[in-house]
Image: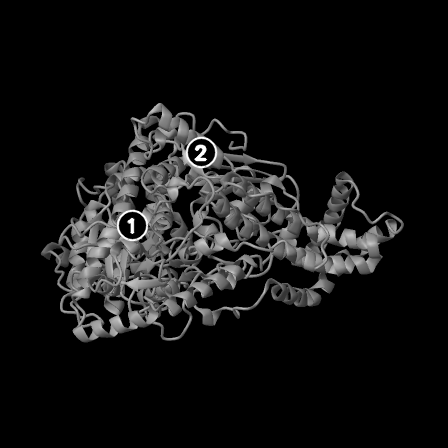
Amino acid sequence: MVTKDDSNKPYYLQQDSEEEQGIVLPAEEDDPTIPPDESKKDRKDRVEKEKKAGVKRVKVGKVEVDPSVDYANFTSGGPGLDSKAVLDDMGMINIWVNLKKPLPDLPKDYARPVKEYAVDRREGVKCPPLNIVIFIVGSRGDVQPYMSLALHLITTHSHRVRIATHPDFKEFVIEGNKYLRGKKGIDGESLEGKLEYFDVGGNPKELMAYMVKNPGLLPGMASLTNGDISSKRKMTSEMLEGFHQSTYTPDPVTGRPFAADAIISNPPAFGHVHIAEALGLPLHMSFTMPWSPTTAFNHPLVNVEQSNAEKGLTNYLSFALAEMLTWQGLGDVINSFRSKTLFLEPLSMGSGPSIVDRLKIPWTYCWSQGLIEKPKDWKEHIDISGFYFMEGDQTFQPEQELKEFLKAGDPPIYIGFGSVVVEDAAAMTKTIFDAVKSAKVRALVSAGWGGLGGAEVPDNVFILEGNIPHDWLFSEGRVSAVCHHGGAGTTAIGLRNGLPTIVVPFFGDQAFWGNMIHKAGAGPAPIPQKTLNVENLAKALEFAISPHAKSAAGEMAQKIKSENGEIKGVESFHRHLPLLNMRCDVDPSRLALWYSDKLHLRLSGPVAALMVEKGMIDWKDLEVHRAKEYDSKRRVVDPISGGATAILGTVTGYYSGIAQIFYNPPKGIINTTTAIPRGLINIVDNIYEGMDNIPRMIGSEEVREKGKVDDFESGVKEGAKGVFYGYWDGITGLVREPVEGAKKEGFVGAIKGMGRSYVNATVRPAIGIMGAISLPLRGATKAFKNKFSAPQEIVLQQPRKLLSVESLATLSEEKKTELSKKFEDMTTPAKVKERNEQLKKRAKRLLAGDASALEEDSSQTQSQGEKGEDLVEKDMEKISIQAPTQVSAQDESASRTGEANAKADTSRTGESQLSKEEQEAEQRGYERALKELKEREGR
């Protein structure tokens, strides 16, 4: 069990305390920035500075197996919830959820709209050509769909796309350029060669063999005893390094420089969000199975063994428990990578799991909505595109023996398990042969990586050797049905051709797809490979050739063929890019690679190179432009928007205000900009002012005073207090303000207090968040500068410089003259001063709680002169409409409280008495919520 008291455990297994808001650095022995020959004097000076700055040194963990950690078992407990997640022998995560206090289900409208940073919503917007790297861990079936997406990204927008994956797929990726042969890009350039491969290491055959026993790289008990886990953790560490190198290393074939402008990744790559955070790159997640929390269904890798929670809440928590168990298994490997390679702070059990969900990273899921519709609680940042299909090899010619077998009788059933490594190939082969005989069908059996075959082959069976393209084999009625492991790619191509499908899942999402196919009627219930026998396989084969299965599969095929998966996938990727912060200010048709803090300008490669050539700027004055910022250490102040693990923690701890959160969750838009863009960061530090005046303006009496900020340590402390008390005062104010108002003015006072309470619930957390951003920065300027804040994106500097010079050579003299004139016009002292003043105004609005100030396009934001008072006034107008509904739920109790205290002194009573009143009022509201909920459901 992980608790806040586990101080002896590696930091990744610890929960953050409210006080720990300062810089967290790896222990000295794990810190690569400390010289091995550091003198005693230097160490003493360093330690003194770190102490003054409030730096905390922690055990990061290591790649080697830690015998004190039970990687296959996660437990968590508290006053509100006990939960457990355990890996079983079938490679699934079994969970137990035991609520100690009753809670309603998550409301249907709990998920809040998501506003993404700097996206350009205008019609007909074009994206400049980008260098995109796609991270993929898995088998050929995982690589192939993204090959198709990559080709569409290239042909439609002239992007340069690098696929970073295992060495087994090098030739497969490079040969994909044949589909680009003879094709031209948007500027008339040849597209051949724009698809690249990068080796990140990892052996997919070993990986597949391991994942048969351990889903998603999570170690089962057998792996802990036979040494599998040690080698696979080392493999994961190697791949993390490889993915990082893939963002800036020259093309290994041509030697051409490469610097990534955006990342697309599947979840098992693990390094995705951490690399994006270090380099300031936009990240887009994509996968073939659900990885985003929802109340609609449970996590595909999870079996719910027992739960007394409502169905939707159980489903939602299953994603949190899967994340927790994954982090427990690999968090130390990831933290070692963050600290030693990326120079980022390590993450804890409170900040590591669900980081992608918490930061609202955009997603594209590539399956058909004919199989799974988009859940209603997946908001604007999540899309479903449809399946991706690789263009078939038109030159393929089967061997003569295969042609003759296909012509010799009824279409056979295809049986194969692709990249999965079968532990006992001989036994599996015998089972297949006997089941085929029993069902009286013909079969094509693919040897695959599992090595099927090798025994005496019956006349009604043909063994497929080598790589036979599925798009050829499964088309034109060559086979009547398919039986496979349930890989997403094989599933998609089979269903697109209307073939009834039998799934024999080995691990991962395979059982999930088998269940979805069975639910649609296009195949029997999946048969886990460890329970496969002659009898159940024979019955499945008979079902697959039935008229019912053929009809259902045919309907599925029609739905899938009506979708344009790759086209929608390309649109989804572009739609979520922060294009407003990615374009060059001088030439908006090109991508910004550089930023000039002196000129407040974003510059493209050719513009920067041209101005350097003309002597108007110097390379050393330019920074690598960071298009997207991420705050992985951001404290969660709203559990609903904080992600699945935040809700798990809130329910487990049963924190104050939990009933209010579940019955009437916070409204409003989640702004995904959790870190201030670089152009504002220095200005924000200088103009922090006045947020605490907002509660006073609306009549709230309790306003906490800020302490003095002298150095980083005091800045962190005050920022932390702002976040903690902002959340506390806002949530508890939902009860406290009506109570205090009723004491003074009876029922009328309660109504006024309700109005103030709902403003506070929004404004106070905002004050805390802004304080946490600005106060530590203010203190840092007077004391210690975090050495880990050095620009991690420095690895992109040299390749971007080379690419800038390269792109300059493509410009005509006329274009160079045009750009030079525009640059000169934009860099006059008056224009530079004007941009500086605009940034200051945006920063002031930001610190006044106006999140629209983060937008990069002034036309999409509010007026520059709008003040915090105006924002509060608008909030009050909204509340004047909403308040009656809220008051009616508690007016009786609030009125009684007012009458009982009519003669009482209006000054604040003791904290213990007030706390009791708050708890009683909250309990009454909660009990009424449950009663109304049950009445609506007819219980």
Q: Picture coordinates of residue 131 (x, y %)?
A: 26, 59
Pick out the residue farthest to the left: 400
* Residue lying at 35% horizontally and 63% vertically, measured from the top left: 601
Instruction: Answer left or right for 165 relative to 399.
Output: right
Pick out the residue farthest to the right: 903
Quadrant showing the C terminus: bottom right
Badge 2 marks a residue whose secondary structure is helix
Q: Is residue 416 visible in this depiction of the protein?
A: no
Instruction: Answer left or right for 260 relative to 408.
Output: right
Of residue 640 and residue 73, the one placed in the foreground of this image is 640
Q: Mark number for residue 106?
A: none
Mark pair 1, 2: CA separation? 39 Å
Q: Earlier in the sequence, mark 1 or mark 2?
A: 2
Q: Picture coordinates of residue 263 (x, y %)?
A: 32, 55
Q: Picture coordinates of residue 106 (x, y %)?
A: 59, 53
Looking at the image, do the residues carrying marks 1 and 2 touch, with CB atoms under 8 Å apart? no
Badge 1 marks a residue whose secondary structure is loop
Q: Amino acid at mark 1?
A: Ile
Q: Which residue is mark 2?
A: 50
Q: Mark number for residue 136?
A: 1
- Up the image or down, 818 lies above or below 444; here it is below
Instruction: Answer left or right for 936 relative to 558.
Output: right
Instruction: Answer left or right for 799 relative to 334.
Output: left
Q: Picture coordinates of residue 125 (x, y %)?
A: 36, 72
Q: Quadrant of residue 217?
A: top left
Of residue 184 and residue 585, the one placed in the foreground of this image is 585
Q: Is residue 321 visible in this depiction of the protein?
A: yes
